[in-house]
Amino acid sequence: QVQLVESGGGSVQAGGSLRLSCVVSGYTYSSYSMAWFRQAPGKERQGVAAIDSYGRTTYADSVKGRFTISQDNAKNTLYLQMSTLKPEDTAMYYCAVVLFVVGPPLDRSRFPTWGQGTQVTVSS
């Protein structure tokens, strides 16, 4: 059973940085996509960034140039480095994985497995 555990959220002032981590366990497949999503209160969950098993990446326009997604296969960990944070980045951040799908997609309907989330709060 695939399990995802996020960490690294917190409170930061606008312009600051945070790095989120997502430790993955329960699978060793070579073909997959992983992604970060976020959901602010009263809003739909939206894709932030995704990476596949080939190392290809996809970013939402709102975070391009500020966020970087990466993975460390030796540590079974997905990262999201967030820089130049803005108050509108405030949300619960979730990592997700889908097996045997590459691209990678940034459509939440493509991802069946999710972590519990980590809160990011950016103050102005």
Image (cartoon, rainbow, N blue to C red):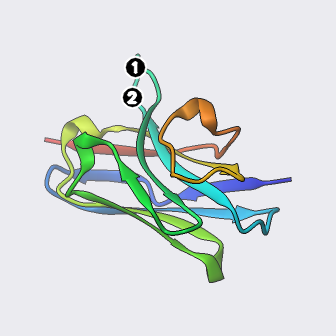
The type of residue carrying mark 2 is Ala
Q: Residue at 77% x, 65% y: name it.
A: 29
27 relative to 86 in the view: left or right: right
Question: At x 65% / y 56%, what residue is drawn?
Answer: 5
Check disc 1 and report its element: helix, strand or loop.
Answer: loop
Classify mark 1: residues with Cα within 10 Å, few (<14), some (14-19) or many (20+): few
Which label was assigned to residue 66? Answer: none
Residue 107: x and y in percent read 51, 34
In percent of width and height, residue 71 lies at 52, 71
Whether the residues at callouts 1 and 2 have beta carbons within 8 Å, the answer is: yes
Q: Residue at x 25, y 42 (%)?
A: 61
Residue 40 is labelled as 2
Q: What residue appears at the point 22 percent right and 57 percent down from the top-left corner?
A: 66
The reply, left or right, for residue 20 in relation to residue 28 is left
Near mark 2 (Cα within 10 A), the count class, few <14, some 14-19 or many ≥20, is some
Q: Nearer the viewer, residue 41 or 68?
A: 68
- Left or right: 6 with respect to 14? right
User: Residue furthest toward the bottom?
Assistant: 74
Q: CA distance from mark 1 to mark 2?
A: 5 Å
Q: Picture coordinates of residue 1 (x, y %)?
A: 86, 53
Q: Quadrant of the C terminus?
A: top left
> Percent x, y for residue 81?
35, 64
- State left or right for residue 75 relative to residue 48: right
Query: In the structure shown, which secondary structural element does the residue marked by tag 2 occupy?
Result: loop
The residue most toward the top is 42
Asked if residue 17 is positioned above or below residue 62 in the image, the reply reads: below
Q: In the depicted view, which residue is nearer to us: 102 or 124?
A: 102
Q: Amino acid at mark 1?
A: Lys
Q: Which residue is mark 1?
A: 43
